[in-house]
Image (cartoon, helix red, strand yellow):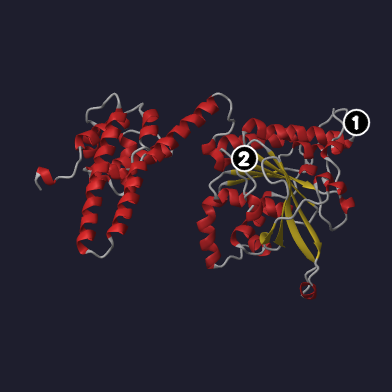
Amino acid sequence: MTRADQLPEDLEAERALLSTLCAPGSEAVAGVLAFSLPEEAFAHPGHRCVWAALRGLLRDGQEVNSITLKDALDQAGHLGRVGGFNGLVDLLSAEEVGRPQVLVDLLRRKWNARRLIRMGAALAREAQAEERTPESLVMQLMTEGAGLLMDGKRGRWEAAGEGILEALQSSGYLTEDPHAAKGCTLRLGLPTLDAALKRLAGNLVVIAARPKCGKTTEAVKSAFAMAKAGHHVAFATLEMTAKELYVVLLAHALGITQDQAARGELTPMDWSLFMDLKETLDRIHIYPFDPDTAWPMVEACLRQAITTWNCSCCYLDYFGLVGKPEGEFFSESARSAALSRRMKALPKQTGCIFVVLVQINRDLGDAGEPGPSNIRDTGQLEQDMAVGIFLWREPCKDPVAVQRGQRWEYFAKIDYNRFGPSYLKTGITLDGAHAQIHEVERTTDQRPDPAARRSRATQAPLNL
């Protein structure tokens, strides 16, 4: 190919830009410029691979150097395209520049020129074939030309947006890291409710229900969903032994009955599934305690788990079994309120999500929809929680289902949410033998008549 026929390119500028942005200490400028230029802007295939590896490292917040780039290229199967590690080191030894933006602009100009040449060649071939009208070819040229002019600007705006977010955070205007949003999300395994459980890191979540309505099963399901998403979780129980809770967890994970899990009656398929889920199950750390164990002892174990395993969520089953603080209190409700305030401090200080299981007042009866005012132990929990999740059952109204022996219909709802929709309700199926809860329909109901509910202000207990 003669020089007159050669497409516009500048391989030395590509080498210099890669060497400059991959140099130690260049992460800040690289974080802006690397996302303003696509891989296609590099004419050399090996340079494209290094540019893609650089962008991947920056996106994941990793350090950029020859070793991490080599690993990223090796993982992608592209290390050979740059001549191996020696070729990569040679590439990164090119001359660095003080203003890499100049090289970015230069390479974008060369890239756009190559695109124009290819665009014109394709247009010329189609015009020569006369298979399309000249008008349609002109419209195509205008559309592609407009797209060419806009390319690159989106990346600049995205990079500028990142800088604005960092500036707002450093000034104290933003208290939540946008990049850590996934760690702020609580998963219940119920899609209708999960979509509303955002921004909960550092907050107290309450799961409330009467006995036998699925509190522990839902907590186990939530812990498993969090572990499956890659999070370590701690599960403190004062109601079960560690073995009993492991049985519930295993029954849920494998979809078998708790009797089968307790006796180890697993089929070859169950064993295969267990081995596949072993890594997930190992992220759930169970801490059994005797009933009436003082909160400081439970708290110390949970803090150790958070420090050791970097747990993003902790579960407590359940509030009423924790030993209440000793001392002079006006009433048992005030004693429970003091415990609630101490529990609220744990997520605030550690940044984890703290999920507490509580009982519903028995005076509500065996059926009927509960709310925050029906929490059994203390109204202070209602003030301290960021989210209130309620499980309950109602007599089955379907004659066919009743004839089959189904007595109850089960429901779950969010009835208070500081960071999202404050009332979401969905139907669920509860299979206690298999430790399974599944959503059976997605229904979002209007909040019940406010006149029939006490306000939060009238529910507050005596302050100590």
Q: Is residue 182 visible?
A: yes
Q: Residue furthest left?
A: 2
Kindly indicate the quadrant of the structure image that contains residue 385: top right
Residue 82 shown left or right of residue 457 in the figure: left
Secondary structure category for the residue under label 1: loop
Residue 367 shown left or right of residue 431 in the figure: right
In the rendered structure, find residue 351 and report the number of the disc placed on it.
Answer: none
Say if 434 sits above or below 118 in the image: below
Q: Nearer the viewer, mark 1 or mark 2?
A: 2
Q: Residue at x 29, y 38 (%)?
A: 108
Secondary structure category for the residue under label 2: loop
Kindly indicate the quadrant of the structure image that contains residue 455: top right
Query: Residue beneath label 2, please?
Result: 199
In this view, the residue in front, 432 or 83, is 83
Q: Position of residue 86 (x, y in %)?
A: 22, 38
On the rendered image, what quadrant is the C terminus found in? top right
Q: Residue at x 81, y 53 (%)?
A: 210
In this view, the residue in front, 212 or 97, is 97
Q: Position of residue 269 (x, y in %)?
A: 53, 66
Say if 391 sits above or below 133 in the image: above
| Mark positioned earlier in the residue sequence (1 or 2) | 2
Instruction: Tell me which amino acid carries mark 1.
Output: Phe
Instruction: Tell me which amino acid carries mark 2.
Output: Arg
Q: Position of residue 50 (x, y in %)?
A: 29, 41
Q: Distance from label 1 to label 2 (Cα)?
A: 35 Å
Query: Crowding near pointer 1: few (<14 within 10 Å), some, many (20+)?
Result: few
Q: Is residue 323 visible?
A: no
Residue 459 shown left or right of residue 153 in the figure: right
Q: Residue at x 24, y 39 (%)?
A: 110
Residue 115 shown left or right of residue 274 in the figure: left
Q: Residue at x 29, y 45 (%)?
A: 40
Query: Residue beneath label 1, please?
Result: 330
